[in-house]
Image (cartoon, rainbow, N blue to C red):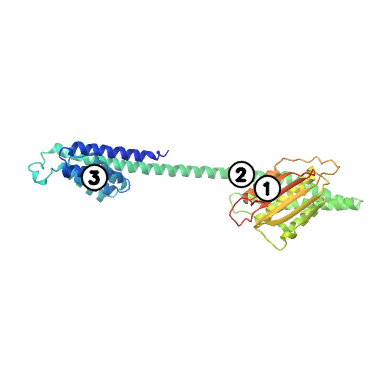
Amino acid sequence: MSPAPWRPVAVDAALVVLALLDALFSAGREGGAPLVLSVVAALGLVVRRRWPYAAFALSMPALYVAYVLVAPLAGLYAVAASTRAKIPLVVCGALAAAGYYLPWPPGELGGRVGPHDLLGLIYTAVFVGAPLALGLLTQTRHDLADRLAELRAGQERERELVSERVLAGERARLAREMHDVVSHQVSLIAVQAGALRITAPDAAVRETAATIRELSVRTLDELRHMIGVLRAAGGQPVELAPQPRLADLPRLVADSGQRASVDLHAVDGREWAEPTERAAYRTVQEGLTNVGKHAPGAEVAVRAAPRGTGLLVTVCNGPPAEAPAPDLPAGGHGLIGLRERAELLGGELTAGPTPDGGFLLEAYLPNAHEPRRGAPAS
């Protein structure tokens, strides 16, 4: 958990105040240059995070001429926490040790420096070693935190890979189920329709049977491509070929077996990105399916027209005929899927009843090559 943004500021402010009090108590009686240098050393701690060497350098004169401790200790710690280079640490440590151990002015050295002054040497070692060790420890803690963050990121990536493998297995299982169940059923429909087309005495029945067989064969072809995609988990993406485009809408409407008209005059000679045209095709396909389920016999008008740089697709049907709606399964996911498809392209989909008792399905689909954005106001 990252610290609060105000915490470093509060720590620096408290440290400066403590260093100013140290300067006042240590050099307040002397006044003059020692007091001024001590105050400068305390104020220099403000920049210790950004310029640690500058903060350390400002604290050294005060250490030499006055007995201040807080500013030099904090400056030496800032240097140790910012670098691992040995030479700068040794130089800064030596300067701090000399300032703490040697008297000021230098002429008062006398017999101070010598092997008998063991206690002074111990204090000097503690004075220099403690901030250096603490600064290096802080660096180590930051390094460990970074390593821990990397390990967590690696674990997260590993979990994602495991999830992808599980998903790949589920996709393969789904592909097998589709092949074993759906393909079998659709194949039976195609076989039965083919037999009916040959044996039926009525020409209209034979024509309907031929249409059913053709649609079944086409469905099987698309299903084979979909199974190939599901089984290609973890490999290169498999294209669903051939992809339906706007030019395929008249055939889709004609094969629907409904009283439907299609108007593509506004888009003649124009092309959109393949995802946009595929989304338009699927929108019309779902619209025709819904009409066949919920409003059989109703007249349907399909229209595609440009809107700005995008494409506006509408499927509008009138009130249902007197014929009862067939009892077909409906999961309620068709419009949800169309809305998600449109939103992935940056567009929108609206659907709802019309005043005459019909139903209107309208999708705005931006060109997939453009950045995602909402649909323009109509």
Q: Which residue is the extreme one toward the right?
A: 201
- First along the sequence among labels 3 and 1: 3
Say which mark, if any, is on residue 349.
Answer: 1
Helix, strand or loop under label 1: strand
The quadrant of the image that shows the N terminus is top left
Horizontal side of residue 122 vs 311, given as left or right: left
Write down the residue under mark 2. 169
Mark 3 vs mark 1, CA separation in Å: 68 Å
Write down the residue under mark 3. 40
Horizontal side of residue 94 vs 233, given as left or right: left
Q: Amino acid at mark 3?
A: Val
Q: Amino acid at mark 1?
A: Leu
Q: Residue at x 71, y 51 (%)?
A: 282
Q: Amino acid at mark 2?
A: Gly
* Residue 187, x across and y down, in percent: 77, 48
- First along the sequence among labels 1 and 2: 2
Mark 3 vs mark 2, CA separation in Å: 69 Å
Q: Residue at x 38, y 42 (%)?
A: 144
- First along the sequence among labels 3 and 2: 3
